[in-house]
Every structure is written in structure tokens, then in C-alpha cells.
Amino acid sequence: MFNEYLISFKLAGTDRLTDAVVLALDQVKGILESRGVLLEGWDYDGTEGLLLIHLRTSSDWLGKVSAEIERIIREATGSTVELVSLSSQGFVEAKGLLPSPLILGFLMRAWTMRGKYNNLNEVDVMALLLFYFTGYDRARAFLTAPFIGIEPESIEKALRKLVETGYLNSDLSSLSKKGEQLLDTLLPKLRVRPLRPIESLNVIDEEGRLEPFSLDRLASSLYRSGVPPTFVYTILKEITRIVRRRRYISKKALTTLVQSLLEEAGQSPTLAVRFYNYVYALDKLYITRDGESTRMSWSQLRRLSSEVLGERGLSPPPRVVEILSELVAEEVRARVSALYWRLEGQAIDWEELKQLAKLKILEVSYPWAELASTPFDQLSQSYRLLGEKYLQGALESDDFGRRKELAVRGLLFLSSSMLLSLGTLPSNIVEVNLGSLRSMVRKASVQSGVKADLARFCNLARDVLHCPAAATPSEQNRLRRALHEIISLMEKLEKGFKAQT
Amino acid sequence: MKLNVLLNDRSFGLEITVSRVEDLHPHEEVIPSHLEHLIRAFKDSLYQRNPVIVDSSSNIVLDGTHRWAVMRALNYEWIATCNIDYCDPLVELDSWSRLFRPPRDINLDLSKVLEGLEIEPISFQEIGNRDLVVIIYNNVLRIRFREILEAFKKLRFIEEKLTKLTESKPSYVLRTSVERHSRSGIVVLPPRPYKEEVVKIVREGHLFPPKSTRHVVPARPMGVNIPLKFLRSKLLDIELVEEFLRQRSPLLLRPPVLLDREYQEAIIYFI
């Protein structure tokens, strides 16, 4: 059971302690969160040397957690650290009053939309949303209101109206059926919709390769080649206007358009060169290996990434290989885009690229690093326990944003645990892990006994991932059911994996 | 930022904001040594951590007189305040009792301490909320006074004499614990003032001695950390302060909580 607590420490002994405390707390956070304890916030009063830490953990862990924090801070800061009693028990129970950032952000946006519904004005609608998203807790609803710019008194009045109009039950403990139906209709309308992509446009390169045009990719190339952010927006807007009615555009035409726009927008011509070098980097680079140079290609980068990722004896899934290859390519592009002349050709050593891949690997697969010191079966077991703990925490959380965060974290550990059991290297991205598992189900890399359960796990996990944090009552019910089913599936899957090995 | 704190189904309104230092009025004198200590601490600080509690209609500082005096001494234009409605019955007012624990070997001549005061012995049960009494090892002596300010002046007179005689400073204890403490020392229990008396005395330009009143607000914001650089500026936009506060996350801590002292009220700690 996750509860919130505030614990306090008195620190003394060194100068510039505030910076040291920040660094120590990052260590604390990393260690505690890998054990399922959440560090929600902290406050350090440098003049008094008093550190307050807001934690979310189970009560039986609190003693151990306090001792662990004390040890880490003492070692990291070199100061004397003493646990301070905040009550006769030593700690105090705390209650976070604001919803998690995911929900608070949604509420802030919802208020700017000033939504009305039938006989409910915008404040009534917001009162209903606040009440729902603060777990039917009036105290939290009142205190959240000023944080989104609403007077708390108006929320108090609106709640009375919501009871009178039958959207809330009279004891103010939950929504009525009518209130649930309203939120099921209203919430999806308040969600942001992604910009419509330019669907029909394709980019053709000098070698005749065709790929769909991506505004995201163009934006990323502009940012990464060093174009100032204010111009990025102008260029994207202009390019969208130009290409809107076309079916094809050549890579060269696109690059030329951007280069001219950059110059017209008052940027130095050097920036146009940098953009060109960035876009064409991979076409102009050569890899030297054993004295021979060959033109850099995606297949070479994938081979290199696969080699590095495979060093722990587990097979890396194709998507993980692809992500690492992209990161390596990105590094290489960044290097050559710094040149002030138009690149014609440059060589890079295979071993140097491997070192680059190793530097980037933690961005793709943290387990790769852990496997250096922990056997994969042991790591799989600890990930499974942690994953289940997070899912349990998600079920117990009354904040939908936190529930979603904990659920996603839980699924990351569970999917990683399963991949390790199946001899595959997990990634840091839960969607990638689920894709890897799904592909194993499709390719029958797992026994039939496990296959159905694994497929079910993947489907349920996908539903959880797709469920918005600011979910409607119906979506919340489905989410809870999915989490329960995943927890019960885990036991079956564990047995299945054991039988398979 | 206006907050409504729901406590046992009753809503208590408060506003965290900034007020001009010169617009506020203290109701108690300061202890010079404590003020010096706080001034030194403030000079090292970047923030005002906790707002002072102020009555929104009279601008009287109910809690935080020393912090207000520090800001004034350091020429700050603004001070972070928590404005409340003093008339709200949820805001309680009592006084601090003084406890002296003289060493056993000291021969106390109480006639010297109470010299010139009109006293009458009473029983423990007879002590009323509006009495000024001295309790010496279970003997209760009531001291007569006409007006509340006079009672507190007499309290100061007794306190100074006892401090000198016992060679120790008093500790401040709650009315509810006086009977227990009176077995181990000398207790001076001042009367419980009325809120109207506090307002009247301040309006007449008088001050209570230090540590006279004990205001209990049902909810107290702490850790708001308003940057002192804001409070130094001549012009300060309240909207800026509100937006600054919105970056913090309030936590509700149920009493009793031991922070710099024991708090018997709910704490809204901005972390």
C-alpha cells in the first residue's frame, strides 16, 4: 500500500551544501525508485540545514527508506545527517493536494476552453472536472482551484448546483450516473488532437528511394542543424504551404527551399550550409575498417549497433537496433553539420563508431548496463517484482495521472522481465518492448502454452498505454480491469517461461 | 492566492499574498536578542519561507511579529503574508504561560517578587480564563488588574523579577499543561485576551509585551519561499507572486507536527 509521508533530516558540516544536496537527492531518487519508492518532492532550507522529503511508499518500508536516504546523503555530501522527528512517530503522514502534472495540465487547458454543457456554465463544468479528478475530495478540489486560476468560493457554489441538478450524489462522495455520462461525452472533446499530417506527399532522394514526407523530421533536422527555434516555425509554415497540394517532392528541392528560406529569413548563409551537411551527412560519409573505406549505409549502422547490443549475450530486437543506429547517425550528423563548407566526403573509423554507439546505448537500453553486473535471470526476477509493485501502486492511486505513470512504469519492468526470460534484450521504451514481444508471438518463438497469455498481455498493455491519463469514468473502469488482469496473468506467464526454459 | 481549506467539513479561507511592510501593525513588542538573531539569518537567506499571519481587515500581524520587524529593519518594501479573517471562530486566541524551574538550592523570597501587587490566594478550580495568576508549588495566587494591557504589564513585571531571582529564562507553555507544570516549578498564567481587545489596543497605539498572545489558526501555509528580491522592489505585481506560487505543490500535514516548533494546526506545506 502506497502512502504519502514527510520525513526530515538535519544536515551540517560543509559549505555549498545546497548543490551537494541536490546531487545527493538525484542519487536517492534513482535508488529508491528502482525499489518502487517514489520521491515526490523535497525542500531544503540552507540556513537551518533542514531537509524535508515527500515520499510515497508503504509504511513498513519507511524505516529502511529513511536509513537509506540518510546513508546516501551523508556519503554524497560529506556532511553529518540526522533524522529529525516531525511527530512522536518520527514522520508525518502527508497528503499531496494537487493532482499530478498530467491531470493538472489537463485541467489548466480545460479551463481555457471555457466549456459549457446544457444548463451548466463553465465554472460548473470545471467544478465537476475538479471533483472527479481529485478523487471526489472537496478539500483537494478547493485547493486545486486557485492553481488553475479559479476562485475556490465559486467551486464551492458550483458543487452545490451540481448536486441540485443531479450530476453529483447528494453525499458528495461520487458522480451520479448522469454525471458519469456527461464526463464520458465531455472529456474526449477537451482532448488535444494532433495536427493533421500531410498524408499524400512523398520525398524522393537522388537514388530513387521514396519515403513519406514528415514535418516532424523536417522540424527535427532544422533544430538539430542549429536553426534558431523562432525560424523553425516560420520555415515549417512556409514549407507546408508550398507542398500541401503536391504528391512528390525531391529531397534536393526540399533542401533547396529550406536553404533559401533560411537566407531570406535573415540567417547567415553558413546556416544553410550546415542544414545541407546535416541532411546529406550519411550520403557523404565513409566508414574505414581494416584499411578499407566504404560508404556509410543504414545496414552498416544496424550491423554495428547489433554487434554492440549483442555483447551481453542476449539478442537485440530489430527496433532496438534501429533506434541505436538512429542515435549514432544523429551524432555523426551533428559532427559534420558543424562544418562551414559543403561536405563532399569524410571518413570515420568503425571502432570510433562503436565507441559512439556504446556512449549512446543507455538511451536505448538501460538493462544492457545492468546486465554487466547482474545475471539475466536475476534481473528478470527483480524487474518482475518491481513491475508488479508499480501496477499495484497504480491500482491504489486515486490520481489518474499518477496511475497512468505508475502503470506505464510497471509495464516497462514487466515487459523487460519477460523479454529477459525469453533471451532478448529489453529497451527503455515500453512500446518497443511490447512490439518485440508481439513479434515473438507472431514468429512462434514462444511455446503455445505461453503464446496466448503473452498475446493477451500485449493487448492489455496496449489498452493501458492508449488510455489517456485524464480518462473518462468508463475508460477508468476498463483501465482498472486491464491492470487486474495483467497482475493475474503474470503468475501464469512466470510458470510458462520456467517450463519453456 | 486565495485558498479554501476544508477542515472537518468547515471551510476556512486564507489568502497568501504580499503586503507592504509599512501597512502592517504589530501587536506585540519584539525580543531584541531574538530580532538580532533573525536579522543575521535573513541576511544569508534568499527567500521568506513562511508568511506572517495577518488580519485582513485591521492589518494586524497576529503571528510573525519578529519576521515583520526583521523586514522593516532591513528596509524591505514588501512581506509575504497569509491574510485571514480574525473574526472567524476557527481562529483561536489564548495566552502563553511562563514556567520557571528554579534550582532547588535557591531560596525564593516571593514577597519581593509580588511586592506592590494586590494578590489573593485561590484554589486551582477557581482559576478563570480572565485571571492573572502565579502558581508556586501548587499555591495559587490571583493578581488583581483593571484592564487587559495592565495585566500583561504586571505579567512582564513578575517575569522580569523571576528571571532575575531564579537566574533562568522562562519556557512558554500552554494553558492546558499549566497544572502539570506547576508541580515542578513556578507558573505565571496570564488572562486570555479577547480578539476585540487586541484590535483596540493596537488601534490605540499600544503593544503587548513579547510572547503575550498565542493565536491558533486552523490552517497555516508554510514553505512558500517568496524570493527576497521580489520583496525588495518598490513595485510588485501581485499576479507575478501568484504565478510564482503556482509552481509549488502544497501538502497537507495533519497536526501535531514538529517543525521549528510544535504546530497544533493543519499545515499547508508548499514543497
Image (tube, rainbow, N blue to C red):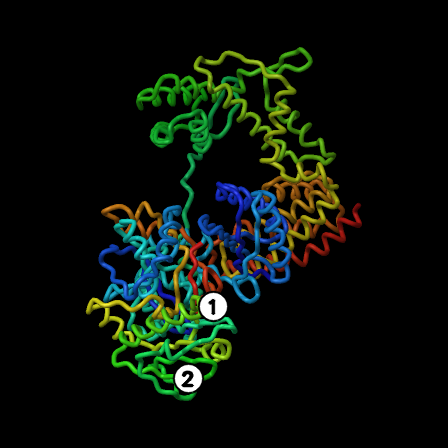
Indicate the secondary structure of the residue bearing disc 2: strand
Seen at 59% across and 18% down, the residue is A296
Amino acid under disc 1? Pro
Q: Nearer the viewer, mark 2 or mark 1?
A: 2
Residue A58 position by quadrant: bottom right
> Is residue A341 or residue A355 the one in the foreground?
A355
Of all chains, the one bearing label 1 is B
Q: Position of residue A326 (x, y in %)?
A: 56, 29
Q: Is residue B105 left or right of residue B160?
A: right
Amino acid under disc 2? Val
Indicate the secondary structure of the residue bearing disc 1: loop
* Circle number at residue B213: none
> Is residue B154 or residue B54 the one in the foreground?
B154
Q: Position of residue B154 (x, y in %)?
A: 31, 75
> Is residue A49 or residue A272 the one in the foreground?
A49
Say if residue B245 shows up in the picture: no
Q: Position of residue B170 (x, y in %)?
A: 43, 68
The residue carrying pointer 2 sits among few (fewer than 14), some (14 to 19) or many (20 or more) residues within 10 Å by Cα, namely many
Q: Pick the quarter of the image with the C terminus of chain B.
A: bottom left
Q: Is residue B216 left or right of residue A405?
A: left
Residue furthest to the left in view is B204
Q: Is residue A199 left or right of residue A160?
A: right
* Circle number at residue B255: 1
Q: Position of residue A467 (x, y in %)?
A: 52, 52
* Circle number at residue B140: 2
Task: Check the image and report above or below for B158 versus A500.
Answer: below
Task: Check the image and report above or below for A143 versus A228.
Answer: below
Seen at 42% across and 21% down, the residue is A255
The residue carrying pointer 1 sits among few (fewer than 14), some (14 to 19) or many (20 or more) residues within 10 Å by Cα, namely some
Residue A234 position by quadrant: top left
